Image: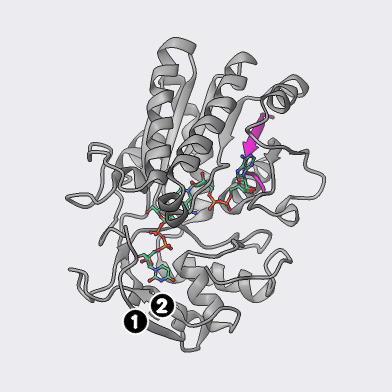
Amino acid sequence: MARYLVSGGAGYVGSHVVLTLLDQGDEVVVLDDLSSGHGGSLQPGIPFVQASLADRKALDEVFAAWKFDAVFHLAALSLVGDSMKEPLRYCRENLSNSINLAEAAVKAGCLRYVLSSTAAVFGVPREVPITEETPTLPVNPYGLSKLMMEQALGWAEGANGLRSACLRYFNAAGADPAGRCGEDHDPETHLIPRAILATLGQLPPLHVFGTDYDTPDGTAVRDYVHVMDLAAAHVAVLPRLDQGSVRYNLGNGRGHSVREVIAAVERISGQKVPYENGPRRAGDPPVLVASSARMMAETGWRPRFDDLDQIVETAWNWHVAHPRGYGTQRSAA
Ligand SMILES: NC(=O)c1ccc[n+]([C@@H]2O[C@H](COP(=O)([O-])OP(=O)(O)OC[C@H]3O[C@@H](n4cnc5c(N)ncnc54)[C@H](O)[C@@H]3O)[C@@H](O)[C@H]2O)c1
Ligand SMILES: O=c1ccn([C@@H]2O[C@H](COP(=O)(O)OP(=O)(O)O[C@H]3O[C@H](CO)[C@H](O)[C@H](O)[C@H]3O)[C@@H](O)[C@H]2O)c(=O)[nH]1
């Protein structure tokens, strides 16, 4: 049995990573300050340290109390729009907190580190699908903050022996099919939960951000990847670290427009999604689609939920069963 530290384990993706590790019989310690996560997403009895990654002393105490086989680092500020308003805060917090965790891990001799990175490191790519060879040119401070940490980790391998996997998620979506965890952000900014919550009358009608893109139906195209597939990728990548550090793009390799997502929510819910067409959202690239060929070839990972309806269905089921999410009031972004 292995033991892992999951930072941000009370958040959306982190809670699904925790489930996946527990399901395979591993031991997990969650470190989270609950700034955007939920105590209610923690599995019963799981060791939980409520602390910020900014607190180096707390990190040293965690590494003194437990020995870890690897660290999964998901805790971050991750709202692109906020990062445009507070670029210095995003760069400072995401980079310094990630470095604090890496330094504490190295000090404790834990030399495997998995970073939640993002498609936002690529900015507006010249071509899709996006491979690991595509130039990284972030167009917002959020993407920059993740890219800076990717680069810092590159240097830490030679100097400190820290082996890292930078997993660039594309659009995380869906929920645990068994209904144990789901997505509950406040504010909620992501398309699929917003479309579902608008349909359930818990948020105002959805705004479609832009209908004049150079795409087949004029709306922006994204690669939605199921959160349990992302969680499985964290496990799949670990053996690869024995050969050195890696960076992988994680998506389904298929793009869906905003209109296609609305149509999927209508098919699954059997209801009309209330929506209005609106202007583009600043900073949104027209099309982001991943090539995950390298991850598949080198780790054997494959997305199990490769169909948009399957992804939407798990999200819909979770929202219907949890009308108040983990229990707090919702507000529109
Ligand atoms: N959701 C997506 O579509 C997506 C896409 C690409 C990358 N990512 C990355 O995946 C990770 C998880 O995203 P998410 O959607 O689950 O976000 P989330 O906000 O649901 O979860 C983040 C968790 O980290 C915790 N946290 C934040 N700052 C902290 C700090 N200083 N110390 C301790 N805990 C802290 C929060 O309380 C929360 O529980 C992030 O790093 C994000 O950048 C997410
Ligand atoms: O109310 C909404 C919300 C979103 N959209 C559109 O739906 C698509 C998906 O938007 P999301 O906000 O769900 O996701 P993003 O693609 O903006 O961003 C997500 O994926 C990025 C990488 O692709 C980053 O990692 C980021 O952290 C993560 O939130 C975009 O074209 C967006 O313009 C709408 O039309 N209306």
Looking at the image, residue 85 sits to the left or right of residue 60; the answer is left
Q: On residue 207, which mark appears?
A: 2
Task: Give the percent coordinates (x, y) of residue 256.
Answer: 32, 67
Q: Residue at x 48, y 83 (%)?
A: 205
- Pick the residue in front: 112 or 205: 205
- Near mark 1 (Cα within 10 A), the count class, few <14, some 14-19 or many ≥20, is few
Residue 115 lies in the magenta stretch: no
Looking at the image, residue 181 sits to the left or right of residue 81; the answer is right
Task: Give the percent coordinates (x, y) of residue 175.
Answer: 57, 61
Quadrant location of residue 184?
A: bottom right
Looking at the image, residue 53 sits to the left or right of residue 148; the answer is right
Single out the residue that lies furthest toward the right. 45
Q: Is mark 1 within 8 Å of ligand 2?
A: no
Separation of disc 2 and disc 1 at Cα? 6 Å
The three-letter code of the residue at mark 2 reads His
Task: Give the percent coordinates (x, y) of residue 303.
Answer: 43, 52
Q: Is mark 2 within 8 Å of ligand 2?
A: yes
Task: Give the percent coordinates (x, y) of residue 20.
Answer: 61, 46
In the image, residue 58 sits, relative to residue 14, either above or below, namely above
- Colour treatment of the image: one colour
Circles 2 and 1: CB atoms closer than 8 Å: yes
Q: On residue 192, which mark appears?
A: none
In the image, residue 47 sits, relative to residue 229, either above or below, namely above
The three-letter code of the residue at mark 1 reads Asn
Residue bearing the label numbered 1? 277
- Near mark 2 (Cα within 10 A), the count class, few <14, some 14-19 or many ≥20, is some
Q: Quadrant of the N terminus?
A: top right
Q: Residue at x 68, y 30 (%)?
A: 55
Give the residues drawn in magenta, as a range: 1-10
Q: Residue at x 65, y 62 (%)?
A: 178
